[in-house]
Image (cartoon, grey):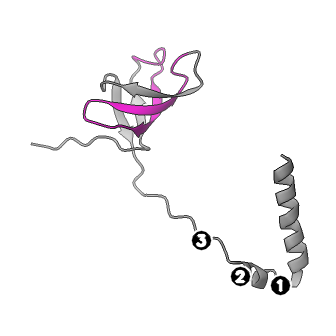
Amino acid sequence: MMEMIYHLNGDIMVWSTAVGGGAGHISIAYKDITTTSFVCFGQNWTIHERTSLEPHANYNNVLGWLRSKTTPPEPPEPPTPEALKKKHRFNWQTFTKNIRNRRNLTNRI
């Protein structure tokens, strides 16, 4: 007997044309995934909601799901102050001034 594979958190759920006013629908699998129910993150399920977490008690009208074949790489470690100073050694004052200006701008926003 073949084992059924269910979606994982982050998979893109694909819905049939029986939902979405005949256009179908997509959403993102979010949590509480079982063989009979799941919660997904969707947008425009109803005219009054922009985004929402939607619990589903069954897989009716779900055509399937899409999953990336690869996992995204881990983000690189931020450079150390020493590495930054070495990289920008000829313009260290200008470099640090630009960093302070960006932080000040962010704080004002």
Q: CA distance from mark 2 to mark 1?
A: 10 Å
Residue at 68% over, 78% down: 80
Residue 79: x percent and y percent?
67, 75
Residue type (three-letter) at the residue carrying disc 3: Glu
Q: CA distance from mark 3 to mark 2?
A: 12 Å
Residue occupying the point 86% across, 57% down:
104
In the rendered view of the protein, which quadrant contains the N terminus? top left
Residue 33 is a magenta residue: yes
To which residue does mark 1 refer? 89
Closer-to-camera residue (82/64)? 82
Q: Secondary structure at mark 1?
A: helix
Is 69 positioned to the left or the right of 1 in the image?
right
Q: Secondary structure at mark 2?
A: helix
Q: Residue at x 42, y 57 (%)?
A: 70
Picture coordinates of residue 25 (x, y %)?
A: 46, 26
* Real-space Cα separation, disc 3 to disc 1, in angstroms: 21 Å
Residue type indicated by callout 1: Arg
Residue 68 at what x, y percent from top left?
Answer: 42, 50
Residue count near mark 2 (Cα–Cα under 10 Å), binned few <14, some 14–19, many ≥20 = few
* Disc 2 residue type (three-letter): Ala
Region in magenta: 18-46
Residue designated by label 2: 83
Do the numbered discs 3 and 1 sit on residues whose CB atoms are within 8 Å?
no
- Label 1 Cα neighbours within 10 Å, binned few <14 / some 14-19 / many ≥20: few
For this orientation, the residue located farthest to the front is 107
Q: Earlier in the sequence, mark 2 or mark 1?
A: 2
Residue 4 vs residue 31, the one in the foreground = 31
Secondary structure under the numbered disc 3 in the rendered image: loop
Earlier residue among tags 3 and 1:
3
Which residue carries the number 3 mark? 77
